[in-house]
């Protein structure tokens, strides 16, 4: 059987992750972005072929060994990217975040990136937590985008094995209840739609209301669906 270089890398990644996890060794993924292609190929495909997505080993092993992510300003180059990057990491139940210094302050102006700091303060409440000790549970409504945009590369106009659906933290949106399905209406390239940094938790809520038609605002990455103030979780 002939294997391509990509097949060999995918096989090696899967085998190394399994070898480490069986011995209680955590897994580190050196790249965290708001959205990603070849993210999840799924249990059946990963088990029955040589191909796995980048995040498949995380979902296999994040209940048994620590998970770490590493990321940089060139991967999360604006506030929206930072916000959705952190949500993506928490969705994978990250235990350690290695954030480069340029995400905390601008190395040219030496000014603090205050909006990023507010997001990191909120994120820190959930890193390394379990269902038994998390301060709250939530769903961030989102959907994979095509074209898939990155801070560091040209957009990919074809999607292949992306992560579909919400980013979730011990809470699942039930699309089968009456009025429970959210609808991706449009992408709005307006950076002003990003929620204030001190209200990020208020923006993350799954609504199951029959009288509300849900939209999806999107300032350059993914943006959470708006939440009626009566339905916002307490910070």
Image (spheres, rainbow, N blue to C red):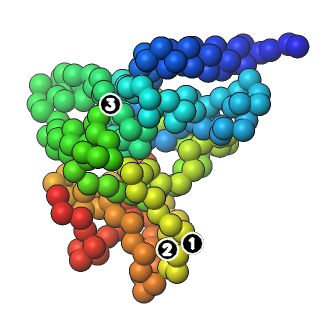
Q: Position of residue 196 (x, y in %)?
A: 20, 56
30 versus 187 height, above or below: above
Q: Residue at x 39, y 66 (%)?
A: 206
Residue at 47 percent of width and 54 percent of height: 166
For the residue pair 111 and 115, the one nearer the viewer reads as: 115
| 197 with respect to 26 (left or right) | left
Residues at marks 1 and 2 touching, judged by CB atoms closer than 8 Å? yes
Disc assigned to residue 95: 3
Q: Give the x, y percent position of residue 18.
A: 57, 19
- The circle drawn on residue 180 is 2
**Earlier-in-chain disc, 3 versus 2:** 3
Residue drawn 52% across the image and 76% down it = 177
> SS at mark 2?
loop
Q: Is residue 235 left or right of residue 6?
A: left
**Whether residue 146 is situated above or below residue 97 in the rendered picture:** below
Quadrant of residue 67 within the rendered picture = top left
Residue under circle 1?
A: 176
Residue contact between numbered discs 3 and 2, judged by CB atoms under 8 Å? no
Question: Which is more N-terminal, label 3 or label 1?
Answer: 3
Task: Say which element carries label 1.
Answer: loop
């Amino acid at each position: 059987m002939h294997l391509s270089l990509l097949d060999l890398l995918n096989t090696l990644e899967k085998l190394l992750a399994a070898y480490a996890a069986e011995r209680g060794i955590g897994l580190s993924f050196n790249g965290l972005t708001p959205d990603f292609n070849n993210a999840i190929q799924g249990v059946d495909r990963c088990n029955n072929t040589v191909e796995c997505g980048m995040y498949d080993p995380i979902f296999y092993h994040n209940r048994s060994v620590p998970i770490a992510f590493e990321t940089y300003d060139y991967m999360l180059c604006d506030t929206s990217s930072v916000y959705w990057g952190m949500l993506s990491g928490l969705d994978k139940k990250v235990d350690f975040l290695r954030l480069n210094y340029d995400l905390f302050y601008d190395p040219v102006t030496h000014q603090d990136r205050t909006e990023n700091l507010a997001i990191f303060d909120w994120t820190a409440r959930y890193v390394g937590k379990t269902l038994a000790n998390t301060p709250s549970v939530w769903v961030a409504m989102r959907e994979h985008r095509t074209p898939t945009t990155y801070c560091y590369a040209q957009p990919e106009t074809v999607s292949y094995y992306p992560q579909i659906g919400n980013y979730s933290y011990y809470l699942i949106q039930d699309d089968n209840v009456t009025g429970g399905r959210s609808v991706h209406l449009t992408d709005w390239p307006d950076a002003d739609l990003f929620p204030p940094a001190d209200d990020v938790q208020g923006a993350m809520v799954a609504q199951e209301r029959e009288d509300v038609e849900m939209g999806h605002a999107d300032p350059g990455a993914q943006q959470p669906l708006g939440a009626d103030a009566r339905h916002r979780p307490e910070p």
